[in-house]
Image (cartoon, rainbow, N blue to C red):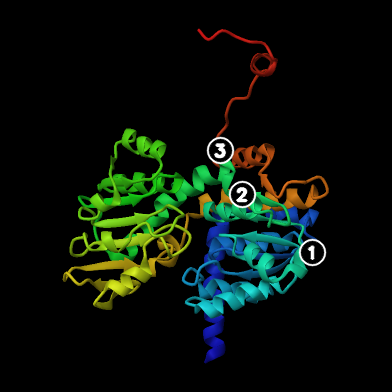
């Protein structure tokens, strides 16, 4: 019977992977190219990204390019067991399952590092941090890596500033073809996919509090408005706060927004964004969720200390009764709501993001002898090539500069502004 269950599991994962593959034309083209050129031949790649179907297809694309893949998830609740099973069935090395304990999560991270990777593809810099802190003997083996997220890039910049980062990293999240689309449209849709499927509650007419107005916050706020919500934005950056105001949203401090919100979504990349002071100001039934990388934006430790009772209110929703008698609810333990309570970003969006990942890895390995910086932006030509391929896949053509226009713009002449 266990064998039958295992077959059913990997077949389920395989169907999911084939579905996203059908909606990821850029990666399909890269897979076909890599199968011929083998840019990663003889290389071991350690990858830590939320392990669902789109990530699985990226792993297969890299494997088609000759890479020996060592894979783990980047969040205890975002791994999908049927996807992991399908990758194992494809003879890839996978160390992940849904709902791992902190000890198991750490052990899985160690397993991929202990494979002595030549290249690292990271989401939040867990792999990069671990190999520097506890496996310095493997650093010389690493050609470089790619970082997927805003949070991970912040960690890399801190390491670089402290002169601790010892190999070059591509700042994939900063590529225009990644953050302008993945962070805004991908997060914007997938956050509400996760909230809606988990709560089964209407958004229209409710008040939504979005903490953080970066690209992810912009997307979440835009989609909340589209669903009919009244949207409040909280910020610490005065420029982003003005943006939110001019985009038509109400801006205020979290302390003032706390009594008003029906739904709360944190998207800051910081910690302790919603704390005990705010919990105690919330009304009965307020629902909290996090779309930042780590489960520290909603102060879950503080909420657990404060609560007089906690209980499972619905699958993946925990209720916390506070000393004042009010019960508030948290989705997916305060972890990434779009992945821990959903399937993550749409396939068409991740097609662009993972195309940037694959091309950045290819570029860094090809140019490793010429790269001297530890923090590297994705080359503009790589960024634009992905954008043009995306347009082509959508059957969209755009204009190109004539020689005269190019000379006008870049020929060095000064022109009066009329």
Q: Is residue 217 visible?
A: yes
Question: Relative to residue 192, is residue 90 depicted above or below?
Answer: below
Residue at x 54%, y 80% (from the top left corner): 103
Q: Residues within 10 Å of mark 2 (few under 14, many from 20)?
A: many
Instruction: Give the image location of residue 166, x and y in percent.
Output: 73, 57
Q: Is residue 252 left or right of residue 269?
A: left
Outermost left residue: 325
* Residue 141: mark in rendering: 1
Observer-nearest residue: 372 or 172?
Answer: 372
Q: Quadrant location of residue 87?
A: bottom right
Q: Label 2: which residue?
A: 172
Quadrant of res 222: top left
Of the numbered discs 1 and 3, the one sitting upstream in the chain is: 1
Q: Nearest the camera: 93 or 134?
A: 134
Q: Is residue 103 above or below residue 241?
A: below
Q: Position of residue 44 (x, y in %)?
A: 75, 66
- Is residue 29 at all visible to an observer of this figure? no
Which image quarter: residue 56? bottom right
Query: Dot 1 lies on which element?
Result: helix
Q: Residues within 10 Å of mark 1 (few under 14, many from 20)?
A: few
Q: Secondary structure at mark 2?
A: helix
In front of the other: label 1 or label 2? 1
Direction from residue 399 to residue 112 in the image, left or right: right
As measured in the structure, the alpha-carbon distance from the residue carrying label 3 to the one carrying label 2 is 26 Å
Q: Is residue 51 above or below residue 178?
A: below
Residue found 33% across the figure and 63% down from its top: 197
Q: Which mark is residue 395?
A: 3
The tally of labels here is 3
Asked whether the beta carbons under mark 1 and mark 2 sit within 8 Å of each other, the answer is no
């Amino acid at each position: 019977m266990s064998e039958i269950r295992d077959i059913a599991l990997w077949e389920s994962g395989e169907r999911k992977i084939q579905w996203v593959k059908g909606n990821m034309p850029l990666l399909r083209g890269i897979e076909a190219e890599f199968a011929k050129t083998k840019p990663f031949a003889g290389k071991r790649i350690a990858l830590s990204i939320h392990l669902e179907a789109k990530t699985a297809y990226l792993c297969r694309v890299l494997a088609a390019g000759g890479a020996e893949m060592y894979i783990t998830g980047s969040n205890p609740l975002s791994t999908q067991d049927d996807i992991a099973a399908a990758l194992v069935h494809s003879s890839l090395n996978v160390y992940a399952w849904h709902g791992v304990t902190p000890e198991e999560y750490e052990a899985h991270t160690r397993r991929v590092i202990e494979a002595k990777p030549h290249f690292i593809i990271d989401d939040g810099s867990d792999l990069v941090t671990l190999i520097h802190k506890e496996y310095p003997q493997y650093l010389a083996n690493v050609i470089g890596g790619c970082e997927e997220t805003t949070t991970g890039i912040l960690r890399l910049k801190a390491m670089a500033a402290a002169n601790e980062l010892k190999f070059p990293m591509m700042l994939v999240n900063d590529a225009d073809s990644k953050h302008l689309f993945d962070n805004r449209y991908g997060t914007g849709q997938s956050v509400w996919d996760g909230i809606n499927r988990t709560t089964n509650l209407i958004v229209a007419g409710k008040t939504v509090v979005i903490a953080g107005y970066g690209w992810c916050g912009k997307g979440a706020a835009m989609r909340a408005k589209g669903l009919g919500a009244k949207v409040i934005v909280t910020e610490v950056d005065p420029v982003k706060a003005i943006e939110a105001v001019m985009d038509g949203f109400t801006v205020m401090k979290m302390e003032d927004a706390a009594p008003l919100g029906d739904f709360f979504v944190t998207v800051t990349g910081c910690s302790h964004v919603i704390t005990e002071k705010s919990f105690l100001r919330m009304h009965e039934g307020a629902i909290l969720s996090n779309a930042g990388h780590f489960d520290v934006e909603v102060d879950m430790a503080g909420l657990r200390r404060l609560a007089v009772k906690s209980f499972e209110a619905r699958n993946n929703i925990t209720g916390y009764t506070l000393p004042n008698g009010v019960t508030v609810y948290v989705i997916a333990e305060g972890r990434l709501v779009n992945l821990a309570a959903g399937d993550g970003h749409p396939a068409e969006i991740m097609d662009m993001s993972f195309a940037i990942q694959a091309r950045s890895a290819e570029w860094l390995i090809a140019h490793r002898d010429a790269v001297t910086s530890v923090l590297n932006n994705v080359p503009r030509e790589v960024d634009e090539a992905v954008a043009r391929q995306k347009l082509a896949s959508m059957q969209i053509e755009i204009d190109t500069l004539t020689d005269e226009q190019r000379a006008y713009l870049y020929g060095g002449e000064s022109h009066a502004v009329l």
